[in-house]
């Protein structure tokens, strides 16, 4: 892929690898900061908090939809792709956000929700009213609701069919998600043109990337599963080609809740590249499984089988996001175990998953929060944080659907957690006031004032990660251990063009999920005789033996990131 065209975005240098070096931060405009006291977060509020995000070490923001929408699915029901929802601000303010982010060397990624629109979108209104008109074929219409019977239902809590009857057109329309989200008809080339124009609109405003929402579901066919069908890949390849031609350096991120070998197809091929990044869905629930089961084996197996992202591409790793903690990528047995540990109250469940935030899932255990983040920041790929998780925000399971984890950001112990000066009753969602996670205690201001707070800890780890490009750019080798609670892998990078000069770097990462201290023997072929030292404080550790093994003692639910130095000479082969 070439990057010959100049990139003129303010404040940003051309960096074809930026997405592989970045720490991403998902921030919902509605939830972060309200600038005008109407109780709803907005773009001006987000702009006012860019300094905080820069301080934290964030390199790129991912903004879920902020477009015109009836907000029946958190904005994933778009009614106008090129208009900002008035409560959030204006296109001009969005341009200002991009400029100010770029000035701080931060990039902006936005959601591209193209599988479906809101039923309020003028295209759908025109389509239902005038089947022969210019929009008649923009959606998937049928006289029967018996087509595509092999296609599963995704929102099992609310939907009984992927078809809904429209009383105006007197036909059924296809929808993979809520019935108020009709699927666009990608068989219609005019739909492709419309989507390309939407991409150009936002790319011209300077966005650095697009998260392709629900991307496997663009096409369906008779007898097919409606997931990742060949024409879906052809469309993405066509979109990528346009991006490379017209907007080199901007990235596409696939949101495909599937197994790694299926998701990996969204990277495309050398000849027909598709996405630069894809979210890693299977790894995430296995981290949570390991924390409760004290077994690293399933996570170790998954990581060993992990498909390496092709040259120049990256996985996106995450612990939580704005959706439920999806359990689609685990077996029924594991799913039931996880419901038992993490969703013991049925109210905590949504579809096939758990609608809770990170800190409550981990019972506010500092050890577990650190362990989970240490994994997040050292697994291959780029980490995605979810707003508020850096301070251990709580949730509100009495709110409907996934709103449980979309409450206002907690900035201070003051009114509305410093999020808004509106009357508290006017907020788009109430601030969290539960016993453990009340905004009086859990907020940015008080954590800034405590040097050992979770916020400072996470910031420190982010900065350590960023000082070692191996985490973003290196390969991973999973190692054998003699303790099934302990996971170990080595990250290796040839080291060109980093602060290390051209020196290669190796980092041994070890994690114990045991609920008591343990010792583990780690077999590290290739590291025979190597010296080890702690990446944080530099303290020396026992060297790897001549047999390539090292025994480490680990505290309860703890981890090490160890710099692998030169061989001590003990049994070193060369
Ligand atoms: O636009 C509809 C939905 O699209 C994304 O959905 C993803 O989340 C679902 C769970 O909420 C998941 O089951 C599905 O596999 C994903 O594609 C988006 O992130 C959702 O917020 C949105 O409702
Ligand atoms: Ca506002």
Image (cartoon, helix red, strand yellow):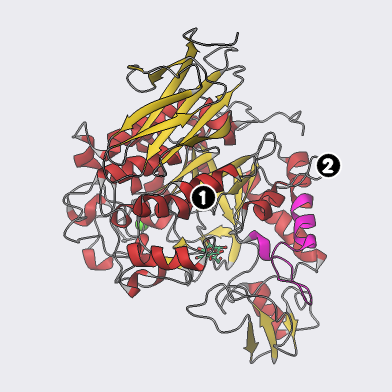
Check the picture and name the quadrant holding the N terminus. Answer: top right
Marks 1 and 2, Cα distance to the nearest angstrom?
28 Å
Give the answer, above or below, for where 432 lies relative to 572: below
Q: Nearer the viewer, mark 1 or mark 2?
A: 1
Give the number of the disc on residue 283: 1
Residue 223: within the magenta?
Answer: yes
Residue 300 is situated, as x and y percent measured from the top left of the image, at 51, 44
Question: Residue 292 in the image: x percent, y percent?
Answer: 34, 54
Q: Which residue is mark 2?
A: 271
Q: Position of residue 330 (x, y in %)?
A: 52, 61
Taking the spot 73% from the left edge, 79% from the top edge, the residue there is 148
Give the residue drawn at x 34%, y 62%: 342
Which residue is at the front of the view, 224 or 164?
224
Region of the chain picked out in magenta, as a range: 215-237
N-terminal label among 1 and 2? 2
Query: In the figure, residue 251 lies in which quadrant?
Result: top right
């Amino acid at each position: 892929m070439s990057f010959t065209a100049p990139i003129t975005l303010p404040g940003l240098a051309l960096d074809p690898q930026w997405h592989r070096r970045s720490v991403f931060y998902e921030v919902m405009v509605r939830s972060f900061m309200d600038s005008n006291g109407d109780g709803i977060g907005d773009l001006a509020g987000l702009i006012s908090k860019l300094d905080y995000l820069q301080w934290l070490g964030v390199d790129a923001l991912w903004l879920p939809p902020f477009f015109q929408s009836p907000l029946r699915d958190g904005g994933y029901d778009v009614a106008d792709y090129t208009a900002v929802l008035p409560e959030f601000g204006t296109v001009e303010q969005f341009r200002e956000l991009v400029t100010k982010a770029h000035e701080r060397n931060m990039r902006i990624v936005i959601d591209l929700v193209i599988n479906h629109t809101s039923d309020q979108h003028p295209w759908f209104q025109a389509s239902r009213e005038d089947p022969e008109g210019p929009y008649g074929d923009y959606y998937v219409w049928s006289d029967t609701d018996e087509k595509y019977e092999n296609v599963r239902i995704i929102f099992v809590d609310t939907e009984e069919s992927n078809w809904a009857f429209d009383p105006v057109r007197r036909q059924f329309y296809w929808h993979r998600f809520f019935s108020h989200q009709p699927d666009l008809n990608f068989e219609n080339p005019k739909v492709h043109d419309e989507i390309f124009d939407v991409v150009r609109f936002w790319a011209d405003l300077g966005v650095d990337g697009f998260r392709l929402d629900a991307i496997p579901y663009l096409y369906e066919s008779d007898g097919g599963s409606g997931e990742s069908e060949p024409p879906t890949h052809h469309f993405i390849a066509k979109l990528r080609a346009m991006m490379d031609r017209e907007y080199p350096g901007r990235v596409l991120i696939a949101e495909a809740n599937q197994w790694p070998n299926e998701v990996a197809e969204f990277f495309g091929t050398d000849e027909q590249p598709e996405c630069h990044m894809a979210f890693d869905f299977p790894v995430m629930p296995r981290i949570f499984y390991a924390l409760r089961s004290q077994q690293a084996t399933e996570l170790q197996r998954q990581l060993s089988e992990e498909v390496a992202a092709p040259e120049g591409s990256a996985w996106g790793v995450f612990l939580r996001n704005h959706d439920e903690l999806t359990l689609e990528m685990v077996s029924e047995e594991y799913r039931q175990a996880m419901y038992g540990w993490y969703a013991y109250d049925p109210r905590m469940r949504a579809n096939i998953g758990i609608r809770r935030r990170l800190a409550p899932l981990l019972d506010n255990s500092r050890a577990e929060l650190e362990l989970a983040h240490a994994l997040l920041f050292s697994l291959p790929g780029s980490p995605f944080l979810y707003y508020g998780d850096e301070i251990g925000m709580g949730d509100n399971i009495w709110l409907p659907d996934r709103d449980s984890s979309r409450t206002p950001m907690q900035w201070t112990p003051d009114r509305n957690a410093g999020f808004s000066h509106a009357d508290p009753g006017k907020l788009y969602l109430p601030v969290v006031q539960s016993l453990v996670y009340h905004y009086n205690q859990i907020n940015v201001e008080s954590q800034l004032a405590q040097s050992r707070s979770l916020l400072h800890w996470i910031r420190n780890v982010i900065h350590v990660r960023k000082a070692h490009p191996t985490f973003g750019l290196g390969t991973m080798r999973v190692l054998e251990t003699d303790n099934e609670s302990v996971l170990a892998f080595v990250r290796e990078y040839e080291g060109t063009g980093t602060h290390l000069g051209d020196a290669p770097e190796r980092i041994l990462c070890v994690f114990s999920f045991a609920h008591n201290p343990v010792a583990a023997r780690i077999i590290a072929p290739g590291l025979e005789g190597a010296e080890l030292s702690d990446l944080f404080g530099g303290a020396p550790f026992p060297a790897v033996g001549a047999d390539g093994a090292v025994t480490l003692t680990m505290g309860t639910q703890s981890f090490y990131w160890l710099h692998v130095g030169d061989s001590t000479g003990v049994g070193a082969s060369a």
